[in-house]
Image (tube, rainbow, N blue to C red):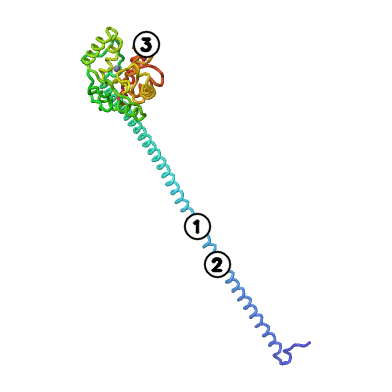
Amino acid sequence: MYHGVSLVQTKHGRMYRMKFSNEVTLYLAGFIALIGIITSIYLATIVKNQRIETAILQQNQNLSLQQLAQKDGELAAASTTISELHGELVAIKEDLEELADDYKDEQNRNEAFENQIRDLAGTLGDLDKLAKTDEELLAKYSKVYFLNENYIPTRLSQISEKYVLPGKKDQYFHAEVIGHLKDLLDAASKAKMDLKIVSAYRSFDEQVDIKGQFSQVYGTGANTFSADQGYSEHQLGTTVDLTTPEIGGAYNSFATTKEYQWLLDNAYRYGFILSYPEGNTFYIFEPWHWRFVGIDLARYLDRSGKDFYELDQRKINEYLLNFFE
Ligand SMILES: [Zn+2]
């Protein structure tokens, strides 16, 4: 048998070997124990670290949850506030709408009231106008109903001489409608019609004189020729007898002139009508005798083909309001 230590073979050789073997074992055990300690410490450290990390994580999680809960709370509070504000807004909007409605109602009431006032003022104005409008201006006269001998127009204006047949005295017309007479004669003149006035306003006394003259000339026939009916119309100041310089006083032949035809076609536009047209059943035909009845009524008569004296007096009086227009 061979052993390395047996090279120093002494009497103490065996003991020597034994001693060596014991030391190695001791070192090994120490080493293993050291490793065990180190490993334990290492493992313990890892576990501890893990615990700490877990704790930190837990803490962080808790914190986050807490924050989340807090945010939730805040959000809930904000949401409540928003819905409250929304509610208030809705209420305010409703109030405003009610106010707007009230305002509109009030405005409508005011407008209705204003309209009523205006209507009333208009009615009063019309009534006032009517009250001031002389009903005689549109009256139908007859042998039974004629103008009072004291009647005189509110105001008379002298007719410019250029419209009057030469040799005739000064002529007068109702001041408020003389403009219409001028319009008529100017339009005639423009259409190359030579129309002249023979007679316009005549007072009661003048009429009596004329009637006297006619009576002397024509005897009892004068009643139908001149006076009773046409007489009142001249006393109104709104009626004219027209002729042409050519035929002068030969009134009856006036119906054959182009001037007469022009009057038939155009006089109504200026408010004038023929009181006693050809074929009328109220009086003798007077082609020269034209009465102002207002443009509205004259137009109506022209349109309807009716004579003034055919109309009912109440129907005629509807035109009093606009007589002067
Ligand atoms: Zn006349």
Decide which of tag 1 and tag 2 comes sooner along the chain.
Answer: 2
Q: Is residue 148 above or below residue 71?
A: above
Of the pair 154 and 287, the residue shown nearer to us:
287
> Label 2, label 3: how many angstroms apart (C-alpha)?
139 Å
According to the image, label 3 marks what residue? 281
Of the pair 121 and 65, the residue shown nearer to us:
121
Tell me the mark number nearer the camera, choosing from 2 and 3.
3
Q: Quadrant of residue 138?
A: top left
Quarter holding the N terminus?
bottom right
According to the image, label 1 marks what residue? 64
According to the image, label 2 marks what residue? 49
Instruction: Give the structural element (helix, strand or loop) at label 1.
Output: helix
Q: Quadrant of residue 257?
A: top left
Q: For the residues labelled 1 and 2, say whether their Cβ atoms are less than 8 Å apart.
A: no
Horizontal side, residue 10 vs residue 267: left or right: right
Q: Is residue 143 above or below residue 165?
A: above
| Residue 82 screen position, x and y as percent | 43, 46
* Amino acid at pointer 3: Thr
Decide which of tag 1 and tag 3 comes sooner along the chain.
Answer: 1
What numbered label is drawn on residue 299? none
Quarter holding the C terminus?
top left
Q: Is mark 3 within 8 Å of ligand 1?
A: no
